[in-house]
Image: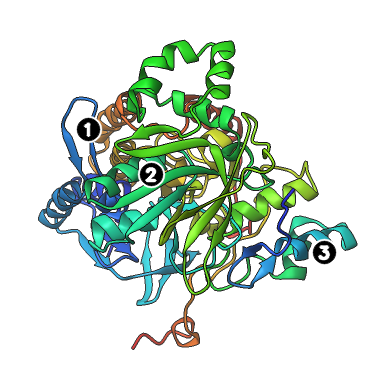
Amino acid sequence: MTDLIVIGSGPAGLAGAIAAAGTGLRVTVVDEFIRPGGRLLGQLHQEPSGEWWNGIKEAEKLQHEAHALGINIRCGVSVYNIETAEAGWKVYTNEGVLEAPFVLIATGAAEYPIPVPGWTLPGVMSIGAAQVMTNVHRVQAGRKGIIIGANILAFAILNELQLAGIKVDRVVLPEKNAVSRQAGEPEAVIRSLLNAAHLAPSALLRFGSRLMKNETIRNIGTRFYPKNGLKINGTPLQLRKAAVEIIGTEQVEGVRTVDIDAYGHVIPGTDRLYEADFVCIAGGLYPLAELAAVAGCPFEYIPELGGHVPRHSETMATPLPGLFVAGNITGIESGKVAMAQGTAAGLSIAKQAGKQAAASGRQLEQAIEHVRTIRQQVAIQFHPDIELGRSQMNEQWKAHEGTSVQPGEKIG
Amino acid sequence: MIENKQLIICRCEEVTYEQLQSTARQHTCSARELKLRTRAGMGFCGGRTCRIALDAIMDSFIPDENKAVIPLKYQPPIRPVSFGTVGGRHD
C-alpha cells in the first residue's frame, strides 16, 4: 500500500517524497531514467560564493535520505496515463498500474530546440543532451562543437563542457524567424543576459552590466559588440552571427553563418562556414506538464514561468483533489527552488492526509517561506521576471478558489 | 518568416515548414486542425520535441488564440507503450 506516488525523482520529487515520508506516509517514487536525481545529475558549477555545486553528490544525498525513510524508488518506470480512482489516483506505468490517494507530479521541464536547416543530421543535439553525455554518461560529444543559442542554460552547460575538456569553437545565435523570435535578436539577447550579470561570462559584460541597464548605452553596446565576440574561457560568444544551416552529408561537418545587425537582420554577403563535428541547439526549457493535462488540471499561460503551467497554490496543490505539483512543472527555476517546492508539497500532502496536523501546519508555512527565500538567493535565474510570474499564478489561484474542477475533463 | 521552406519542424512525422504554411493558407484552420491535417506533433515523441516550435509557427499564421488553452491537446498514452502494456500484460 502506498499513500503517495511521486512521479519524477529529480530535486522536487525526491525532496517531496522525503518530506512526506518524514511524517509517516508510505511513498513510492517512479522515474523513467535509469537512476534517480533528474536534472541534478547533469549539474556542476561554481556558486558566486566560490563553493562548487555537484549535482551528482546532491542526488546521492537525497537518495540516501530517501532510502533511510523506507521510500521505494523505482527507476526505468514510465508513466503514460493518470486517471481518478475510487479513492485517489490510478497511475499507469510500463510496469503496471499504481494506485494512491495522493500523487505528486514532479516531471520537471523539457527542452525545446529551435529548428535550423540540417538539424536532423547525426551530431546535432540539444544543449541538455550534451550535458547528459558529458556529466552523466561521461561520453565526449565530439572533438569540436558549435552552440546555437545564447541563454543561461547554454552558458551553464558551455562551462561544464569546458571543465570536461571538450572544445566548443563558438556560440552563435539562431537565425531570427517565427520560431527563434527574440533568441535571434542580439539586442534582446544582451538584455536577457544582463539580467544574469552576476554569472555573466565575461568581465566586460559583468563590468558593463550596471551601465548597460541604460537603454542608450545598451544600444551602443550592441551595435559595437565586437565582431569576433567576447571570449568565455576561450570560447567566442558571437552575438552578431547567426547560424543559417548545419552542413554535412552523413553527419555534422560544419555550420554556415551570416553576420546580423542588432535586431537580427542579415547583412548580405557575410556568409562564413565554420567546421565542427557536433552542434548543440540551445532553445530553452518549458514545463513538462503532460500528466497534469491528461489528469484534467486547469492551466495558466504565464511566459515568465516558461509557458503553460498547471494552476497551483503556494502549498503546491492543484484544483484536483489529491493532485500536487512541484519543481519545474510549475515554472522554470533552479534545482534549489525545486527542492524547496518539493518539501512544501510533501508537507502539504502530509497535512491533507492528516499526519501531524498541528506540527506540519507550522512546518508548511516555514517551507513556503523557504521557497521564497531560496528564490531570491539562487545563482541561476532563468527568467528575470520570475517573481512577477509567481504572483500572477497566486492571483489566478485565488481568483478561482472554490470553483470546482472535474478530474478527467480533457484540457487543451 | 522562415526562408528555408524545406526545414523540418516535426521530426517524427517529417513535416516541413512549407507543408504547415500551405495547409494553414489553404484551409485557414485552427492549430488543432493544422495538427490533424499535417500530423505535426503527432509522432513517436508525442510532440515533446516540436511542440513549442509548432505553437510559435501556428501563432505566426493564426495569432490571438486563447492563450490559456493549450493549443495542442495532450492525450494518453503520453509515452510510447505496447498494446500488451495497455492491455495489462507486464512481462
As shown in the figure, which amino acid type bears the numbered disc 1?
Ala
Residue at mark 1: chain: A
Residue at (40, 62) in percent of width and height: A277
Residue tagged by mark 3? Answer: B23
| Closer to the camera in the image, A212 or A222 | A222
Foreground disc of the pair 3, 1: 3
Residue at (61, 29) in percent of width and height: A262
Q: For numbered disc 2, what is the local secondary structure?
A: helix
| Closer to the camera in the image, A211 or A389 | A211
- Figure check: A307 above or below A86: above
Tell me which label, 1 or 2, sits earlier in the chain.
2
Looking at the rendered structure, whether the residues under marks 1 and 2 are on a common chain is answered as: yes
Q: Characterize the local packing of mark 2: few (<14), some (14-19) or many (20 or more) Cα atoms within 10 angstroms.
A: many
Q: How far apart are the two marked residues, 1 and 2, measured between alpha carbons?
A: 24 Å
**Residue A48: x and y, percent?**
24, 26
Residue at mark 2: chain: A
Q: Is residue A168 among what the camera can see?
A: yes
| Residue closest to the far front | A269
Q: How far apart are the two marked residues, 3 and 2, measured between alpha carbons?
A: 38 Å
As shown in the figure, which amino acid type bears the numbered disc 2?
Gly
Residue tagged by mark 2? Answer: A327
Quadrant (top left/top right/bottom left/bottom right) for the C terminus of chain B = bottom left
> Is residue B73 found left or right of A318 in the rendered image?
right
Residue at (34, 44) in percent of width and height: A158
Q: Characterize the local packing of mark 3: few (<14), some (14-19) or many (20 or more) Cα atoms within 10 angstroms.
A: some
> Is residue A266 found left or right of A371 in the rendered image?
right
**Residue A381: x and y, percent?**
39, 31
Q: For numbered disc 3, what is the local secondary structure?
A: helix
Foreground disc of the pair 3, 2: 3
Residue at (23, 51) in percent of width and height: A165
Foreground disc of the pair 1, 2: 2
